[in-house]
Amino acid sequence: MKVMLSYSHQPNGATAPDEESEMVRMDANLFRLVATVQGRDFTRYNLNGVHIEPAANGGCIMVATDGHRMLVAHDPEGECVEPVIVKLPRFSFAQCKHPKMMGARRELMVDADARSATITEITKVKDQEDNRETILTAYDVLIDGVYPDWRGVVPSGSYSGTPGSFTGFNPAYLKEWSFIGTELAKTRGAVPGIAIQQTAEHAPTLIRWTGVEEIFGIQMPMRIDVRAALPPFMDQPAEKVAA
């Protein structure tokens, strides 16, 4: 993928953004978090970016999956008319983070016609229009292809579990869910707890963060060889200690 950093220069074949270009806008930091689970398999190239689509209740929905886990986020302030799949260069993710200063945020704008993406920092100025500063522009960021029906794996309902049954998870994935919670805390002030809900044995598991409504995860369980609630040594009577 060809990537260029620019504030004004356009690569051959690209056109400067204008009011008639098809624009997609979203919270840059939310895009960054969703992108942490995008695929990396060249044989399933359509999963190697973040799928963005219009939300029925306004704004846009961002989805990414590598086939083992999935993140879905809603940006109520986002804009999207037609679905696109966006893959930013990895080094640009650091520029997607919201600044630490109060009243500042970063927005990601995708120009579908120019196949470019621009990260802009927006700072509120008292009694004035918001100040906008271009941080980074990358080109050739769109993935051509059809994204799979991600809603088909989202669980519904509740499941209390079968007595004696276990659900296994890749520990590396659990660590990444914790990372998402830590990153969310940077804009909330406290680390949200992780809630895990299984709707059926060996079915996709819903991952939520307490008090967080704009993003959720899906984890595919793995089969594990555990046949008892406690390991065998706990079945042995406690050793008596001489008085």
Image (tube, rainbow, N blue to C red):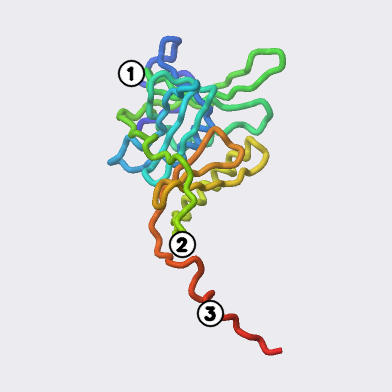
Amino acid type for the residue under numbered disc 2: Gly
On the image, the x and y values in percent for residue 203 come to: 40, 48
What residue sits 60% from the left and 41% below the top?
210
Mark toward the start of the polypeptide (1 vs 3) = 1
Residue to which mark 3 is pinned: 236
Whether residue 34 sits left or right of residue 11 in the image: it is right
- Looking at the image, do the residues carrying marks 3 and 2 touch, with CB atoms under 8 Å apart? no
Quadrant for the N terminus, please: top left
User: Nearest the camera: 61 or 172?
Assistant: 61
Residue at 63 percent across and 85 percent down: it is 240
The answer, for residue 6, to whether it is visible in the render is no
Residue at 54% from the left image edge and 22% from the top image edge: 77
Q: Nearer the viewer, mark 1 or mark 2?
A: 2
Tell me the kind of residue under disc 3.
Gln
Foreground pick, 9 / 128 = 128
Please, what secondary structure does the residue beneath circle 3 have?
Answer: loop
Residue 27: % across, % down? 53, 27
What mark, if any, has residue 164 been given in the picture? 2
Q: Which mark is residue 136?
A: none
Left or right for 214, reference 11: right
Q: Secondary structure at mark 2?
A: loop
CA gap between label 1 and label 2 equals: 61 Å
**Residue type, mark 1 in image:** Gly
Which residue matches tag 1? Answer: 13
